[in-house]
Amino acid sequence: MIGSRQARLWVLVAASAAALAWAVPFAWMAVASLRPGVPVDIASLTPAGPFGLGNFAEAWKSGSFPLWYFNTFVMCAGILAVQLVTISMAGYAFARLAFPGRDFVFSLFLLQLLLIPPLLIVPNLATLVSLHLYDTLLGIMAPYFASAFGVFLMRQTFRAIPRDFEEAAMLDGAGVAVLIRHVLLPLARPGLVAFAIVSVTAHWNEFLWPLMAVSSPRNQVLTVGLATFTSGAEAGSAWGVVAAGTFLVAAPLLILFLIFQRRFVSSFVSSGIK
Amino acid sequence: MTDITRRTAIGGALAVSAAAAMTRTALAADPVEIDLFFPVPVQGMLANKMKELIDRFNGQQQAVKATAVYTGSYDDTNLKTRAAIKAGKPPGAVIMSANFVREYVINGDVDPFDPIIEKDGKKPLEFFDNFWSALKPNAVIDGKVYGIPYQNSTPLMYYSVDAFKDAGLDPEKPPETWAKWLDAAKKLTKPNGDRWGINFPGTYDYCGWITSALVMQNGGQYYNHDYGGEVYYNAPSSLGALTLIDTLVNKAKVMPPGVSDANACTSAFFAGRLGTMLLSTGSLSFVRDNMKSPYKVAFLPKAVRNAAPIGGASLILPKGNTPERQAAAWTLISWLISPETAGEWSRFTGYFAPRKAAYDLPEMQKFMTDHPDAKIALDQLKFAVPWFDTFNTVAVRKAMEDQVQAIFSGKVAPADAVVAAQKAADELLRPYVEQTALKAIG
């Protein structure tokens, strides 16, 4: 009894330490964003003040945040919508259908995970140009419509669902489409939610590909917009404004996470991603 | 301010109409649309200022409609430009880190400016005399003009007047030699990191830039300015420079160990915890706006001679544009480098204006009188030397930077560092050297 209590205490301590390490940068960002000018003790987590919202005002007027929010939202939602369809269907094919070379094709899919994305910038750009998608939001989205990670995740999720459900539905005369739509997908929801979180955070935070694929200011997304007034190679930075801008970029995701925290955690636990 | 703006607008309008008149395609009814890729290498509202300039350009003439496209850091801009050229969508013009121009020439990814300059009835090399001569080696390659300097800098020594007084040093007499610099640094340094005598950024890019400055002050060439296949990392001048760094950090302990970035240097400087720092002239505006106590600037201390390497960016013409688009790009470039526009950009950013005539304008002369620190940065130009550029520039630069960073951490002796850096650099340069200098004759 005492032994298990001690073990739980240790787990709690370790988890708190990890949470603290994760939280410190956010805490610093929040503190720094409230401090005007370039304070001497900018690294401090508990400064004396003064505080103010001036940095947020300056960051907001340095860029076109409403446009960037809109573009980023369209991009993330568009990618996710198409991905959910493609990964469910491909995941089903790899999990349930028998066809020659299935495992070989699946290994090819997984191999794709080993490629680092910057390697594909030039070929992808050339494809975009030939499809007349260069410098469009659709162009940023296109390469992500198929996701090897998502297919893998859905295949595993489908395989974990007992076949009894499908067999019962088939006895009632359900075809493949009905089977996927009304039997498998509802049961696979934790997997889909887990994938959605990974997908949206990844694309929300991505910098390099949107920078490459889009040129017009009207198609700019948050990350690239943020960099226009925060990166400085030859000079120091006004950390307060940088922190405020970063806060504006991260805020929607942070708020979403706080609202749906409980559901997210249970999705990750039941989908096996931890 | 309004006075300056009005005068600039009039001057700019003249420059535009002149440039437009020289461009035959400007007579076409529809404006030619071009992109200008630009990086933001210094902090501040530069992106907004650039948009303001381009809007003004678009408002003053109808032949060209330019769009300013922000493209990240110097490295991101390089990556995006390369990818865009390869994908067949080159921008009309790019503001490119000046030390990447040679690689674009080696890879055949840029067009020379010579034909367009000749169309204007000028000789390309004579036209280039409009710019400070130290800018030439990074822009004029194999006798052709591939880069038009746009914003340039050199390292500069910034020092805190209060720290000098506190240490019993005369703020009117900054150290002029390495020996005096080290001596002053010893007096400036307080125990427990309360105040350091010297610091400069040791992050990639900055590290190589400052190292090359020290080597060149020590009489060295650092790299072959005319041929992209040779570096002189294992030369006495380089060994001396690395030994100085080793002394500052590990022996005299007047410089903080480990790698500092530019932010760490400026933060410590503003806080009075740093006596002298080497930083870009491009930081002048930032330091001026944020330093609360008095500071001064001075030439970099010398060893054998004075030397300060050029930094900054040039305008280039990416390969793959139609003559019509090139002409449109030239109209934009001519306006951007007009003394009026160049001067305005210089006053806003802190960079010096590469166009010499910019300093003849009354508003520029007034600015120099009002800001003696900018005057010193300009005076140092007579000692300016070209910026490191070779085949595979970034990797070859890092071969030395990795060793210097190891010295910052006290992990390697200078004598071993120069040998290791030379060996790594020679490996990286070999493919180019075999295609050029060592190509079998006949």
Image (tube, rainbow, N blue to C red):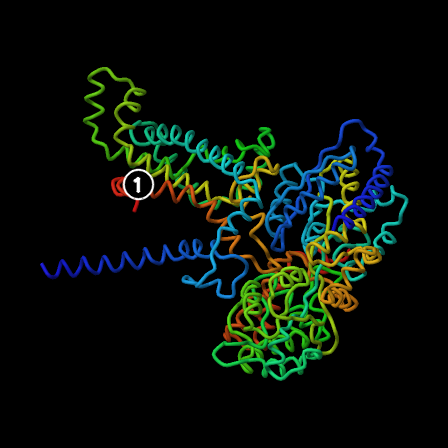
The residue pinned by badge 1 equals: A264
The percent position of residue B278, horizontal first and vertical second, equals 63, 69
Residue furthest to the left in view is A1
- Other residues around mark 1 within 10 Å, as few (<14) / some (14–19) / many (≥20): some
Badge 1 amino acid: Phe
In the image, B226 versus B43, the foreground residue is B43
Q: Is residue B85 above or below residue A78?
A: below
The quarter of the rendered structure image containing the C terminus of chain B is: bottom right
SS under mark 1? helix
Identify the residue shown where x is 75% and y is 53%.
Answer: B149
Q: Is residue B254 visible?
A: yes
The percent position of residue A40, horizontal first and vertical second, equals 52, 66
Q: Is residue B84 left or right of residue A171?
A: right
Q: Is residue B181 above or below residue A206?
A: below
Q: Quadrant of residue A252?
A: top left
Q: Is residue A147 above or below residue B7?
A: above
Label 1 chain ID = A
Identify the residue shown where x is 71% and y is 41%.
Answer: B54
The percent position of residue A60, horizontal first and vertical second, equals 54, 44
Q: Quadrant of residue B184?
A: bottom right
Identify the residue shown where x is 18% and y is 26%.
Answer: A164
Q: Is residue B434 visible?
A: no
The percent position of residue A224, horizontal first and vertical second, equals 55, 44
Q: Is residue A77 left or right of residue B285?
A: left
In the image, A96 versus B77, the foreground residue is B77
Q: Is residue A202 above or below residue A91?
A: below
